[in-house]
Each structure stands twice: as C-alpha cells, then as structure tokens.
Image (spheres, rainbow, N blue to C red):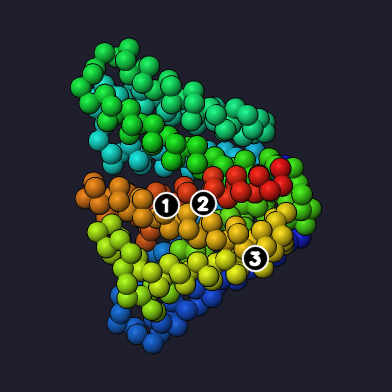
Amino acid sequence: MILTIPEHSFYAMLGVLGLLIIGSSTRFFLRYKNPNKDDTELRQRIQSWWWMIALLFFVLIFSTHATIIFFGLISFLALKEFLSIVPTRLADRRVIFWLYLSIPIQYYWVSIGWYGLFIIFIPVYVFLFIPMRMVFIGETKGFIKSAGILHWSVMLTVFCISHIAFLLTLPNKNVLAGGIGLIIYLLFTTQFNDVCQYFWGKLLGKHKIIPNVSPNKTWEGFIGGLLTVTLISGFTAPLLTPLTVIQGLGAGCIIAVSGFIGDVVLSAVKRDLRIKDSGHLIPGHGGILDRIDSLIYTAPIFFHYLYYLHY
C-alpha cells in the first residue's frame, strides 16, 4: 500500500532532489570549463547518489514494510561485506549462518514494534548464543578473537542499522512529517555532516586529528562541520521530528560527533586490513560499509536521544 507523504517530508524530499540537481549541474559546468580533466569518479559518485536516493524514496513512499525490508537488505549486504574483509576461521561458517538468520528475526521485532526484544535480542541473546555455538563446534584455536569479530560484525551491521527502520514504528508525534521525516532527518544530517567536514577540511584544514588513522581529517574540518550541521539541524528538527529547536541543536551536535567517530572507526578497520575500500558495490563510493560507516554510529545514538526525549 502506497503511503501518503506528510507535507514536510514531501518538501524535504524535493529539497534533497534539488541538491542532487545542483550537484549534477555543477559537474556539467566543471566538465565544460575543464574538458580534459578526468571526472569519472565524480560522475560515478553523483550517479550513484541518484540511484540510492531514488531507491530510498521509492520504498519510503511505497510502504512501511517495504522500508523495513529495504533496511534489512542493507544489513544483509553490510554483514556480508564485513565478513568478506575480516579474518574468520573455516570452522566459523556454521556460526555465520546464525548471524545471517538474526537479520530477519531482528527486523521482525522492528516490524511489530516490539521495542523490548528489538533492543536486547542481538546485544544479549545473540551475544550469548555465538560463543555457545562455537563451543559445540569444538575448535578452540582463535576462539576469543573469532567470537569478538563475529559479535562486533552483527552489532555494527544489523543492530545499529536496524535503529533506522525502527524510527518508522514510533508513534507519530509530528503529523506533518511522520516516520518518513525522522528517517530523512537522520540520513540527511548524517550525510550532510560528511560533506561539511570534507568541505571545511579542504578549505581550512591544517591540524590533523588522527593522521595514522585518517590523514585527511582535520580539527578545522571537524569543527566547521560540527557547527554547520548543528545549526542546520536546529532549524530542520521541528519540521521533520518532534524535537524543538534547542533539542535539534543537541541532535545535530551528537550526529556530527558520532558520525565522525563512525567514519574513523571504519577507517581504522580498513587500515588494519590494509584495504582502501570495503568493497566495490557502489560505483564511486566503494562498498556499502564505506557509505554507511557514519550511520552505523549516528543511527542508534540519534534514536535513543529522540526516544529518551519524546517516547
């Protein structure tokens, strides 16, 4: 069943499409000014954004269940990609099956709005089940390292991402935005934070934060992005969420900080594994983990901030 798009969410969608049009127009202009410059990566990134935004908006408009299934698929692809780059034991294959099985179970709790099981199923029950299943396999070499990798993988890719889908099942406390507004607010603010930190870093960046992990991250970029996103969030929060302007400023602040942390944590993983990208699923962006690294942190932190204040 196709959902009726709340007024503010509809205008937010139009605003995102407007930004994509501006981005595409800018690329055409730059290519016209510098026809000999290779813009393949920029072209691929913008084209991928069009496809990703179109798919997201389609499922958001189509139905709540379609959106929940969509984020379940995101979790599946992210888990699959994560397990493809981290070291696992041959004996772990029988355990990994249960990690994949946790995805439909976790998103079932989301679909019926059962907050109690949603919030403890993976952190408690899956956490306890993984080492138990490993014990019955009987392989003790590398046991601790493997248990940590498997639990961390399902926490990051399934538990954290499922918080985005659960936003749709929360009681509607902003009739002009609905659950769609909550998701658009979280996704836009998180991605806008990445763009702002990159922009301010390129413009003013001189002092590196953690050069051994992410050499392009600077204090100027981080602070510039933090201030910009906090102000934008304060303005847009009352339009798309139940948050007030002041609460929106707080949301923008925690999204900017947690988004930065998510980015550098996944950068540390890739540096440890000596890879540049987590995969090649999204042209111009790398793998799906490269695209959702910030969301892995911002989704649960924003969710619980919102839940504490209004639910």
Look at the image and tell me whether residue 71 can be seen: no
Q: In the image, what residue type sits under mark 3?
A: Gly
Of the residues under marks 1 and 2, which one precedes in the sequence? 1
Query: Residue at left 62%, top 63%?
Result: 249
Q: Quadrant of residue 35?
A: bottom left
Disc 1: which residue: 262
Q: Position of residue 284 (x, y in %)?
A: 37, 61
* Label annotation for residue 44: none
- With 89 as the anchor, is 194 left or right in this view? right
Query: Residue at left 67%, top 68%?
Result: 235
- With 140 as the anchor, is 190 left or right in this view? right
* Label annotation for residue 234: 3
Look at the image and tell me whether residue 245 can be seen: yes
Badge 2 element: helix
- Quadrant showing the N terminus: top right
Pointers 1 and 2 in contact (C-beta within 8 Å): yes
Badge 3 element: helix
Tell which residue pokes out farthest to the right in this image.
175
Disc 2: which residue: 298
Q: In the image, what residue type sits under mark 1?
A: Gly
Q: In the rendered image of this protein, does residue 227 appear above or below residue 285?
A: below
Q: Position of residue 50 (x, y in %)?
A: 51, 62
Q: In the image, what residue type sits under mark 2?
A: Thr
